[in-house]
Image (cartoon, helix red, strand yellow):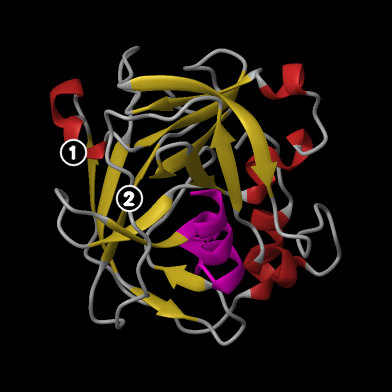
Amino acid sequence: MIKPSILAIALICLFVGPSVVSAQQVTRLTPTQQAPWAAVGQLVKGRIGTQSVCTATLVAPDVILTAAHCVNGAKNETPSGLRQYTFAAGWNKGEAFATRSISEIIVPRSYVPGGEDRLRNLNSDWALVRLSDPITNIEPVPIVPLPGPWETVYFLTYSNAEPDTPYLTSGCAHRTLEEGPLQIACPVSSGNSGAAVFVGQPDNPQIVAVIAAKAQNNAFAVVPGEELLSRIESLQ
């Protein structure tokens, strides 16, 4: 994560009860395996490949989707300050399919960093980030409704421990909690924040949620609502 968050710690207490079980697989991608995942990239402030990262996904030629706590500190940055942030699409072992600085950040009004209502913050922990220039050689990933719990989900992430290498985690069972977020029965680590949760075949992935926090061996993700979808449409 670009900015540390107390949310992941708090969620250990917020979400208790029966868990879901996954037959997960974790695969480290080599540069030759990266092509189908070019829309997923690393988002950093400063130099790409550092140990302070978030994950983001291209959802329009000039818009990426990530977690609000990854970029909330940049909302009021000057244009020159925003240019310190870089999105590296398909980053793997020092190479990227495209790199862009950012020019605008959209975070829900309901998101209050460090606020006492941590559950409300979790449900609002998404951000749309406009890139300085469109990326035209990569197909954006569409957002679709969440499937039934019998269909497993997967995600591609970068981590602070190994920022140069993306990992694909698949076979993750999920369920929607009454409080609103999606519980995913696969662990995540620092740097995975902002990663898109996918369904569908790897050569045609579709986004159903955005990873925002962790608790024990589960990830918790924001399911896109009307505000996020309408914002994407207005930016296109």
Q: Which mark is residue 191?
A: none
In this rendering, the answer to whether 104 lies above or below 95 is: below
Q: Nearer the viewer, mark 2 or mark 1?
A: 2
What residue appears at the point 46 percent right and 34 percent down from the top-left corner? 159
Q: CA distance from mark 2 to mark 1?
A: 11 Å
Residue at 60% from the left image edge and 55% from the top image edge: 126
Residue at 64% x, 55% y is 8
Q: Position of residue 4 (x, y in %)?
A: 70, 39
231 part of magenta stretch: yes
Packing grade of label 1 (10 A; few <14, some 14-19, many >=20) is some
Is any part of residue 217 visible from this angle?
A: no
The picture quadrant where one finds residue 206 is: bottom left
Residue 115 against residue 58 in the figure, above or below:
below
Q: Are marks 2 and 1 in contact (CB under 8 Å)?
A: no
The amino acid pointed to by label 1 is: Pro
Q: Position of residue 10 (x, y in %)?
A: 71, 62
Magenta-drawn stretch contains 72: no
Q: Secondary structure at mark 1?
A: helix
Q: Amino acid at mark 2?
A: Val
Range of magenta residues: 210-236
Taking depth in this image into account, of 80 and 125 the one nearest to the observer is: 80
Tag 2 residue: 141
Image quarter of residue 172:
bottom left
- Rendered location of residue 155, percent (x, y): 33, 51
Kindly give the residue lying farthest to the bottom in the view shown: 178
Give the numbered dot on residue 36. Answer: 1
Q: Is residue 147 left or right of residue 8?
A: left
Q: Earlier in the sequence, mark 2 or mark 1?
A: 1
Q: How many marks?
A: 2
